[in-house]
Image (tube, grey):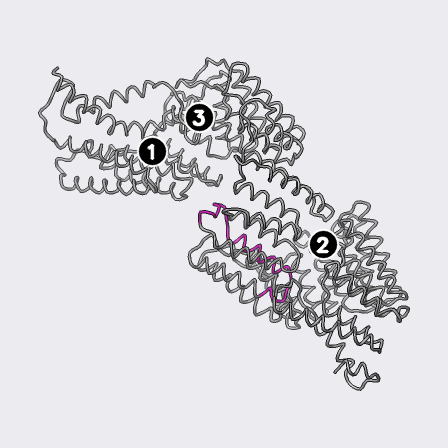
Amino acid sequence: MPCGLFLQILAGWLLHGLFGHRIKLDAEAFQSTTFSFGHMGRFRDAPTRTTLILHASVAKNGMEGIGYDNDGPKTPRKTEKDASKQRNYSLNSDLHFLKKKRNGALLAEQRLETAIHDMLETKERNKNEFSTDQQFPDVVSFNTVISAHAKNAFRDRKAAGRAERLLRRMDELAGDFAHLTPTIFTLNSVMEAYSKNPNTEERTVEVMRLNLELEGRGLSPNTYTLNLLLASICTNSKVWASLEKWALDFLRSEPAVEYNKVDTTETIEPDRQTYNTLFNVYGKIGAFKKAEYLMQQILELDHHRTSDNGHTLQPSRVWYHCVFKALATTNELGEYEKERESKRLLKGMQNLSENGFGDALAPDTETYNHILNVFALMGGIDAAVLLLENMESGTHSGSNIPDCISYTTVLKTFATAQQKLSEDASDKAILLDLAEKATSIFYRMPSDAPPNAFTYNTMIKIWVNVDTRDSLQKAESLLREMKNPDSISYSTLIHGWSKLRFPGAGSRAKELFDELLQLPPSLQRRDFNITTVCNSVMSSFARSGDRYSPKVVESLLAQLEGRFLNGDRNAQPDKTSFLCVFDAYAKAGVAHAEERCEELLNRMQLYKENFNLADLEPDRVVYNAYLNALAKSQQQSAVEKAEEILTMMETSRNPDLRPDIVTYSTFIDCHTKCGERSLERADELLRFVEGTYRRGDATLKPNAVFYSAILQAWAKTGTAKGAMKAEELLQRNIALFEEGNDYAKPHIIVYNAVMDALARGGVKNAGSRAEELLEEAGSLYDAGDEEMRPTRRSYNAVILAHRSEGDAGAKAEKLLDRMEEMADSGRNEVRPDVVTYNNVISAVVQDSGMADSAADKAQFLLDRMEQRGIYPDGRTYGLVIDTWLRRNDEKGNALADAMLNKFQDMLQQEKKSRKSGRACFYEDAVWDVINAYRGPSKNDTLHAFLK
């Protein structure tokens, strides 16, 4: 053969081999048994027989494509066949190039659609001479684009749908173009796209559907197909269990599964990717014992044994990391066992590394980070800190210098330990100590391992967990240190401020929320949800009871609605959003609650009907919130509306609208607070609820809240009869409980209602009897009954009950001292509030034994509450001013004047800022005192003061 001709043939083979069928080889062979999908990488193996055959085909077809056959040269001419082949090579090359670009899958699909259009036009023009086996695009073209969508499915949730649409397009075209019939590679690619859906249930349904379709088409699944199923479907399904057995049987040298559902006796063997997938799944679901067993099986294998595709199953460091992942999240072991297993596995890796496996199993920094994560998830601070110190000092051999992830994971250990502590104030000191220790580790991070956003976010969470104003300010200072705080940084801090029961906390949360909304998309995490964060801010304002909170919460809801209506699906209002508004109405006691609640219901119905938001269908929970807003409005007209709502719920056929025990409790509260005080109605509902429950309706099981509502109805009568009736009901419930009726179990809120009835009823020795009930509740709590823990309300009721007895001031002060002593020791639930101090001052003022010193004592108590961070209101100032004025001398008038000026200054400041968390200053209480002293005065100094 002449040298020039040989060079021409060689050049043609190279061009078409590399740019034509090589693309086909890459597109189809990516799913062969030698391919590893995901992040595990390709296996480095010798070419298989299939690969060699494909290369031979490339060489043969490549020479035919430029006008030569195997026997010698042809006449150089561009035949119809040649032009078609060249278009195919050009198309697949274009697709291969386009799919690597940004939005490459969409660009490649557009290019493919253009080629399909050209193909259909060509067929229409050349009906008589058209040959389908010569036309392009071909299967490889479709597979290239479908696989591009599959690879992009993690980022684009619509990618799986696009991949399947191309599959259906192939089915449509295959009637006229037989060469476009989908292959096993096509179906595998579509399955791979659906396998990346983060929703396990949806992923399982779609992948199983396609697997059944694959078998229905008569296609033979391959190892890649089974690996996809293993990685995608629910692990508690029978199919997954059979696949797991298939993989394990191969290791046990038992006969491999014969996949004969499609009339084939072809044996499908697992490959290395099968075990990659198994280890990965075990790591995700915390199946430590299974992961450890799999590792043991692999270690016990004859290391010369391989599967047909030539891949050894030598254990890798990555597999061990999956075992550590499983250990970190497993529920199969306790904390001590987890720590022990971590050390044992680490020692095992070190031994294997020293005895034949070398660097492949030598623990590295990532290994130690996985061990640190085991400690982090169980809150094992001591073990994590010790391991970090060993890494810093180089105690462990190998490449294990701590990196940013190491430090961040140790800090996560502190956050976990904090979350394990109870929310009681007694743990505040411990929470603070943990935060300070974590901070010292944070600031010792080396310059070559600086903190990243995850590190800062972990530290912000640690300081937020302390749950004090100072700690939240510290967390915010960390946020300001960050170069680019993200949505997690802001959300964590916002939730912290929202939970804090402190004046101005809601306003600070809202200011941070406004900053959060300005973040660019790059700093908004994938799981970021505006609605969730906004609901947190709304809840903070609603809970505060501030008189301005309804307007703020309504404004936030409107902001959420505006974003949603402008296309932001991440800001879709949900039921919680509307419930926050109902709650704000209730806590602030807004007037005209009926009209405002009706408007909310109409808006919910509008969203439900126009946007198909089923979550916004008003249900029992919504109407219970509506009833609560009516009750707290204290408007007499609210009772009639409450009756209307209850009748609607009782007659509704919708089970989601039927009243429950909360409904009846709130309904009774509405009668009590809105002036009707229908004791007959309360008794009627008591008999109805208990009787209905005994007949089998579990939704009406009475509870402490229900019984408290009944008792409060009697307590609010303010009569001796009401107090006596409340005590009778308490004793009745105690007897019912002792007879075995758990629903009547005593609870502190029931005791509180009885003590309140005693305090309001003017019963003789009411203070002594109320204090007996308080001591009884305390004894039950000390004996282990958590539901009988006395609260601030319990002590407030007893102080109020003592008011009408002799020596009331001294007794009230003694109870106040006791409350503050317990609060300082960690019992935050009994920490005095403004109501406590007002009751104590009132007792002091009314105690005839303190007539001479009452004013000094009242002033002392006002100063004392301010020192403890408790803000006095108009009732406090009214009592103190009244006490000073009673002195009827120059000093008393001067101090009364000073108190009035101080109150007015505070009132103006609050109105100016509108950031107070208090519902009302009760300023009328002050003016009532002043007005009582107006008119003719027996004292010139007093007269001058009033002027």
Residue at screen point 42% across, 19% down: 311
Residue type beneath disc 2: Asn
Q: What stretch is highlighted in magenta?
A: 521-550
Q: Name the residue under label 2.
A: 703
Secondary structure beneath label 3: helix
List the single residue furthest toward the front: 447
Q: Name the residue under label 1.
A: 186
Front of the two marks 2 and 3: 3
Q: Distance between the residues labelled 2 and 3?
A: 56 Å
Does label 1 or label 2 sit earlier along the sequence? 1
Q: Indicate which label's residue lies in the foreground, 1 or 2.
A: 1
Instruction: Report the disc number at residue 273.
Output: 3
Q: Residues within 10 Å of mark 3 (few under 14, many from 20)?
A: many
The spot of residue 896 in percent (x, y) is 78, 74
| First in residue order: circle 3 vs circle 1 | 1
Foreground of the two, 842 or 332: 842
- Marks 3 and 1 in Cβ contact (< 8 Å): no
User: Residue drawn at (17%, 24%), measured in percent from left and top?
Assistant: 64
Q: Pointer 2 and pointer 3: residues touching (CB < 8 Å)?
A: no
How crowded pointer 2 is (Cα within 10 Å; few <14, some 14-19, many 20+) is rated as some
Between marks 3 and 1 in the image, the one whose residue lies nearer the viewer = 3
Q: How dense is the environment of label 1, judged by Cα within 10 Å: few (below 14), some, or many (20 and up)?
A: many
Identify the image quadrant of the N terminus.
top left
Q: State the predominant SS element of the stretch in magenta.
A: helix
Whole-angstrom CA distance, mark 3 to mark 1, is 20 Å
Q: Give yes or no for residue 579 being in the magenta stretch.
A: no
